[in-house]
Image: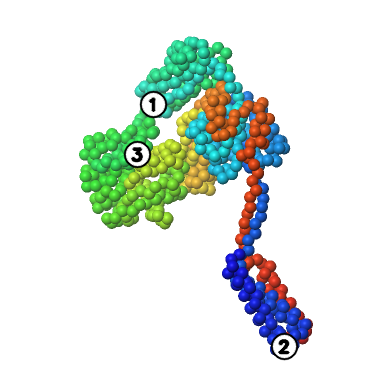
Amino acid sequence: MANSTIIYIILSGIIALLLALFQYVYQSKQTKTNIVLAGLRFVTIFSILLLLVNPKLESETFYNEKPNLVIAIDDSNSIQFLNQSENVQQIIQSLKTNTKLNEKFNIDFYKFSDALTRNDSLEFNTKHTNISKALKDLDAIYRTTVAPTVLITDGNQTFGNDYQYMAKRYKQPIYPIVLGDTTQHADLKIAQLNVNKYAFYKNKFPIEVILVYNGEEPIVSEFKISAGNATLYSEKITFSKTNNSKIIQTTLTANQIGVFTYQAAIQPVANEKNTANNKKNFAIEVIDEKTNIAIISNLLHPDLGALKKSIETNEQRTVSILKPNDFLSKADEFQLAILYQPNVQFKAVFDKLNTANLNRFVISGTQTNWQFLNSVSANYQHDKVFQTENYLPVLNTNYSEFIMPDVAFESYPPLKGSFGNINMKVPFQTLLYKQIGSIATNKPLLVSFESQTRREAILLGENIWKWRAQSYLNHSDFKNFDDFIGKIVQYLASKKRRERLSLSYESFYDGNTSVILQAQYFNKNYEFDNRETLTMTVVNEESKESKTIPLVLKNNNYEVDLSSLPASEYKFTVTANPSNISKSGTFTILDYNIEQQFTNADITKLQQVGNSTGGGVFFQDQLATLNQNLLTDNRYATIERSTKKTVSLIDWKYLLGLVILALSAEWFYRKYKGLI
């Protein structure tokens, strides 16, 4: 407590005493009654003055903080495939029941596969392992504490950053417990298969397969690509200890339209332990047409390259970047024109587009000539202000023209465009609103509309390439942004009549990907209706087993997750009740589980992780040694900590009660003595 506060308290006591004495003792008889009343008045005045001074009281408490012991358990399918699920349960039970460990540590159990969660039960059915993400999440949780980590895993990771490098940034010692056989067995496998998702009718499509052999003895095997019982390609291949990989490159012809499933397989070697990685199914969707898109611009801007790369991630689409004059002679080849920052040199382009009634996507920016653009458009007019502004995007969750992918627009940088608003003269829907700084508005940044049977969209800002870069920073890939642009292009390039029930799904899914189907339902006015009940009936074409699943409302879509379905061909029907509108389709789930491609634990990486973090690597039969190391390591000592708490006297409710009690006692005492 500060010296000045102590002085104020002393002065408060003196003042309270003088006032009490002046009122009840000064020039009065010093009777017992007056002394009691003076004492009560002193308590009242002194308490009130203390509240005005409001001194701060400090209290300090001490407590012991035990270190944490983090148990991270691999819950992926590879643990079950390597017959280690029972061993995992035994290890967990041993750690849970170890009295000395529980006395020394706060033990926390987690499980991980593609994500990290608290361990409630282990299922070993997840098709992906991301050890790097598990370590990153644990590092965020225990960064400021002492938390040695026991990593129970086979060390086989299927996606994500290399966990060996993530471990170097991990702030805690790691003690891997190795699951699975560490003995190297002879193994022949398909390490990678590269093929395009789409092919065009009567064209050849390339296939690249990388084969890898782990073994000592020279062998000869046969590689085949087949469709059903028909062999489409075969080749004899020789491997040895030094010549242990082979790249197969070939082409097949797309003779029919539709989705076709193939199998690439390499004949196993004698006594091969794991044959699941000797074959891989893949599929090709053969289509009869391709969407040609023109990006028209007389500027050099990184937006052009970003748009081209984004659109062409879908093999069904090709993009040509053209000058306005070059487009005129090729206009009939395109289904969509993207006009980037138009100016007066686009006059003939707009005339051609209007004559052909071609769909278009106008992207404006700081160099857009709005006086010209207003003159050639009857559907909208933009304020003519010669200033620029930065606009952040805000998603309109009620947009209903197409199903929006999950894009984190709140993290995207602003676009730069002309200051002012656009005034629409036709019915339109806003996909993105403008936000200026921290102020969200209802002014459109990206709109779409239909006019004279053609579809148009307008984006009021440049530097969309920054959005694609931000998508990579957020997710380590461009998929979210590319899907967003792909949806816009798909909508604008199509002239199909709008339907009340629309579906979004893939023709086939790889065995390791999530199988998600999305739907939108509209009322008779083509407004999104979130009150409808949508159900999906899916039939396995092989087993004829039927299953009915409800679709769940998520944002502005209905969605169903079918990832639990086994590999097969499926027919489905989505029905809206009670309107009784339905739509059907088919899809294929390919048989492939990347978690079953491993024959051994990755002992080398786990040893490097344990040694580099100051921990150590252990096997199941070395649990006693691990426990002893954890118990005797001086780094994991219990720490005595203290907590200081500062409380203002004005927050102390008992003092207010004392004031009320003193005043009440004084009144009753005076009443009792007949002084009132």
Q: Amino acid at mark 3?
A: Ala
Label 2 and label 3: CA atoms lie apart by 96 Å
Q: Is residue 71 above or below residue 436?
A: above
Query: Residue 172, how many percent across, how many down?
Result: 57, 38
Amino acid under label 1?
Ala
**Which image quarter is the N terminus in?**
bottom right
- Residue 151 vs 268, above or below: the answer is below
Closer to the camera in the image, 156 or 35: 35
Q: Mark 2 or mark 3, which has the lower sequence index?
A: 2
Q: Are marks 3 and 1 in contact (CB under 8 Å)?
A: no
SS label for mark 3: helix
Left or right: 648, with 286 as reference point: right
Q: Which of the 4 image quadrants contains residue 662?
A: bottom right
Which mark identifies residue 28? 2
Could you tell me residue 286's position as x and y percent? 40, 26
Mark number, residue 199? 1
Instruction: Pick whichever of labels 3 and 1 is earlier in the sequence.
Output: 1
**Residue 125 visible:** no
Q: How far apart are the alpha carbons under marks 3 and 1? A: 24 Å
Say above or below: 96 vs 596: below
Alpha-carbon span between mark 1 and mark 2: 112 Å
Residue under pointer 3 = 306
Q: Which is nearer the eye, 498 or 364? A: 364
Do labels 1 and 2 touch, CB within 8 Å?
A: no
1 or 2: mark nearer the eye: 2
Q: Residue at x 60, y 42 (%)?
A: 146
The residue drawn where x is 34% and y is 39% is 307
